[in-house]
Amino acid sequence: MNYLRIQGPTKLSGTVTISGAKNAALPLITLTLLGHNPITMSNVPEVADIKTLLKLLSNLGASYTLENHVLKIDTSTVNNTMANYDIVKTMRASILVLGPLLARFGHCEVSLPGGCAIGQRPIDLHLKAMEAMGATITIHAGYVHAVAPKGLKGAHIIFDKITVTGTANVVMAAALAHGKSVLVNCAKEPEVVQLCEILRNSGIDITGIGTSELTIVGTGGKTIDMVDFEVIPDRIEAGTYMCAAAITDSIVTLERVRPDHLDAVTAKLEQMGCRVECSENTMTVYPATELKHVNIVTQEYPAFPTDMQAQFMALAIRAKGASTIDERLFENRFMHVSELQRLGANIKLSGHVATVIGPCELAGADVMATDLRASSALVLAAMAAEGTTNVHRIYHLDRGYENLEEKLRTLGAQIERLQE
Ligand code: UD1
């Protein structure tokens, strides 16, 4: 197993190029199951989660090449509708094949994703929506069996809770259903917006894009002539580098970024005393004279993203005063707290609220990554800590950050990947 060795404290400078968004590329790859033509996607991040999903599509019968961030994929040859446990267990987002497979083939068998380090993460809302569209769902031997022999039919669906992959799954199912679907209380994340825009550009009648209510007229089972497209920049990767600038007291410029997708993150950095300058697709972060404490509540987009919570907790350790972080989306997303405490952080947990008392001097130690974003928080804290930090179990990081250590090294960090 690999681990990262980081020597702190570090100063960064220069420019970092932001990769394509993993969480946009994942549903977009499953979207290709609705197309009948070869499709070219550019700006695809070459991270472990993407490779896992491509392996799943290949198992289903698709062919693809991924070179220099360009994915060429042809799903016209797909003839298998079973998403195996072996792949699904490693990545929950595999559930995104459910809607497209069911809509195209009238049946599919998808392994239940099972538990997850950051909480329960059920898929009941995905399944309820498919049932409302006429599917019969049974759960047997760890698999979701979904059947709709005459195809799915349009439905009026009100999501009980806002769900990102749930919205994406149902949008894809509705695009090939018979008749009109009205989806209420949808996720408005930029990744969902891009999925809808590509469907619209590919000829699907879809309105309400970017709002919480989407209306989609399905093709009645016919596959789509899909357009080629470029994946939007990764706002979470970008936000992580913004925090890297702030925690190391450095000026860093981000290239190929969408500043408008980062408004909530920028606002919190500014409250902490940093300055952020934006152009159309670059952002430069200037450090605070003295970092101020902050109060954060994680919520659905456009509010502050849960995927940036751990990184801001690392930053809050260096800020003056008591910061609070209220995690509203996932019940168990504070596993990084005990690891940050190993580095010297003063954090108190009470239910879903963490209080971080700063500023604290951090000292390098051995720490363990527990999930994707928690891992990047440890890297950030390590860059501010005095001495050597070893971050273990970095396969979590590799799931979603492309060339993290190379990008940080180019900015001036002392970071290397070693073998246990
Ligand atoms: C997506 C993102 C993840 C991010 C999360 C919240 C991807 C691949 N992953 O995850 O990085 O942290 O959004 O922004 O895009 N829920 C239910 N029943 C369901 C579905 C969800 O109760 O059927 C609950 C979840 O437990 C959670 C909340 O709804 O409490 C939001 O989850 P959801 O938006 O579905 O997260 P993901 O799509 O899995």
Image (cartoon, rainbow, N blue to C red):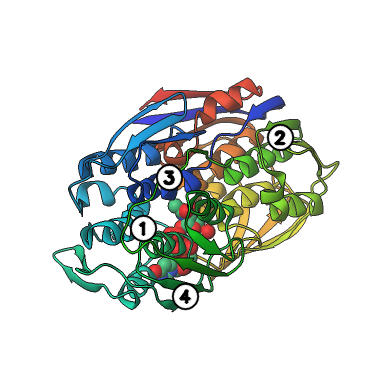
- The dot on residue 159 is 4
Q: Quadrant of the N terminus?
A: top left
Q: Amino acid at mark 4?
A: Phe
Element type at mark 1: loop
Mark earlier in primary sequence (3, 2): 3
Image-based side of 214 in relation to 152, left or right: right
CB of residue at label 3: within 8 Å of ligand 1?
A: no
Task: First in sequence, mark 2 or 4: give its number.
Answer: 4
Name the one closer to the observer, 30 or 206: 206
Q: In this figure, which residue is indicated by the disc labeled 1?
A: 116
Tag shown at residue 248 = 2
Of the residues shown, which amino acid type is indicated by label 2? Answer: Thr
Is disc 3 placed on a helix, strand or loop? loop
Q: Is residue 28 above or below residue 155?
A: above
Q: Secondary structure at mark 2?
A: loop
Query: Total of numbered circles in the picture?
Result: 4
* Label located before the other in sequence (4 or 1): 1
